[in-house]
Image (spheres, grey):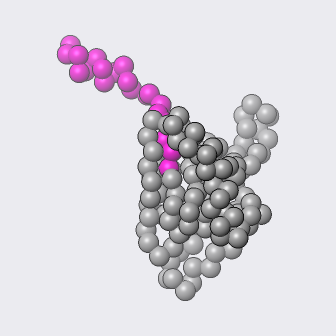
Amino acid sequence: MSDDIETEFETEGVEKKFMFLNRKAPYGTIYALEMLETVLISAAFDQDVSLVFMDDGVYQLKKGCDTKSVNMKNFSSTYKALGDYDIQKLYVERESLEARGLTVDDLTEVVYEDEDDDWAEKPAIRVVSRDEIAVLMEEQDVVISA
């Protein structure tokens, strides 16, 4: 058996840490929707997924987006399903929220069920500083930005 085949079997099922940086506004381009689809695919393959919302990406989580004027389907409710994919780590950059006059109360509620706490629903969104995001980025195997 060749070394390549042995290596393939040894790495099967290896979990990597993926961080997705959402920096674009939710509508007007396909970036936000395509990133969300990539996140869901990664989670379906049992990868360790975290999302960061910064810059105009914070608008992706804003409650009550009206998309009629841009002729696009509102996909923001899909974020509520992230917990069903075991995605528990959503980070929103505090500086980006503040620069846009938003607070955590303006964001869609995203929860997950904590299996270690009798399946209690817990908030998935954490507002963190730019410096904290930098530390989290260093811990990742893969960082993808859009």
Q: Is residue 13 magenta?
A: yes
Q: Position of residue 46 (x, y in %)?
A: 51, 37
Q: Quadrant of the N terminus?
A: top left
Residue at 68%, 49% (x, y): give it: 128
Q: Position of residue 11 (x, y in %)?
A: 37, 24
Query: Which segment is the magenta one?
Result: 1-20
State which quadrant residue 66 falls in: bottom right
Residue 85 can be seen in this image: no
> In the drawing, does residue 12 fall left or right of residue 101?
left
> In the drawing, does residue 143 fall left or right of residue 118?
left
Residue at 44%, 27% (x, y): give it: 14
Q: Position of residue 37 (x, y in %)?
A: 47, 56
State which quadrant residue 118 falls in: top right
Outermost residue toward the front?
131
State which quadrant residue 94 falls in: bottom right
Q: Position of residue 75 (x, y in %)?
A: 56, 67
